[in-house]
Amino acid sequence: GESVGLHLPTLSVQEGDNSIINCAYSNSASDYFIWYKQESGKGPQFIIDIRSNMDKRQGQRVTVLLNKTVKHLSLQIAATQPGDSAVYFCADAISGGYQKVTFGTGTKLQVIP
Amino acid sequence: GAVVSQHPSWVICKSGTSVKIECRSLDFQATTMFWYRQFPKQSLMLMATSNEGSKATYEQGVEKDKFLINHASLTLSTLTVTSAHPEDSSFYICSARRGAGHTEAFFGQGTRLTVV
């Protein structure tokens, strides 16, 4: 992930709409990417991951897109629900061995009922 | 799924005292554990990586004598904040990984430390 800012960017979406959260990473050697959801006062919760040999992966209501050329990740949430309100972080790592997971700047998702 | 538990969930301590935070992998053996610190409205910043039975590797700028990390078993790592000061107040989060070949890390629920 990239450097940390003091203020989290916020994305407000209407309930039922689709959400797209974007993230840039800086380490060209990273080959494993993860999206986490963090609710207030809790630890990060795994949402979905993708390896560098893929450019798209789908889960339940979520899709992650990876563009290695521009070192960009996105998380798409379909039919956003109030329970999706949280801070979302992308993270990257180098698979194999004991490589650390580096977190990017988070995005706060606010779902408007 | 794999469960990582931190204890305590929150702690308030007086300035100058030491505080120990435990991180346990409940249903798997964690060869590697990571400790993060998170300030309000900021991202998680890695403090150190610890492998079972060896010394922790600290990130640049993290004082190893202040943040003591022990990973004596495959299911337990501890972080001790020594001589805590108000600026150490933060949310501390651990994560655990099974080992080589397992990339996914599982996170604990975090520990809120307030130093008064």
Image: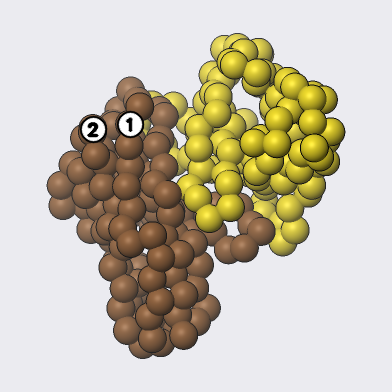
Chain colours: A yellow, B brown
Q: Chain of mark 1?
A: B
* B87 with respect to A84 (left or right): left
Instruction: Give the image location of residue B101, x and y in percent.
Output: 33, 23
State if disc 1 and disc 2 touch (CB < 8 Å): yes
Quick one: label 2 or label 1, which is nearer the N terminus? Answer: 1
Instruction: Name the residue at 75% across, 22% down.
Output: A79
Question: Is residue A112 shown left or right of residue B33?
Answer: right
Q: Quadrant of residue A97?
A: top left
Task: Identify residue for label 2.
Answer: B28
Characterize the local packing of mark 1: few (<14), some (14-19) or many (20 or more) Cα atoms within 10 angstroms.
some
Q: Nearer the viewer, residue B91 or B73?
A: B91
The amino acid type of the residue labelled 1 equals Ala
Mark 1 element type: loop
Q: Is residue B49 above or below residue A19?
A: below
Density class for disc 2 (Cα within 10 Å; few <14, some 14-19, many ≥20) is some
Q: Which residue is mark 1?
A: B2
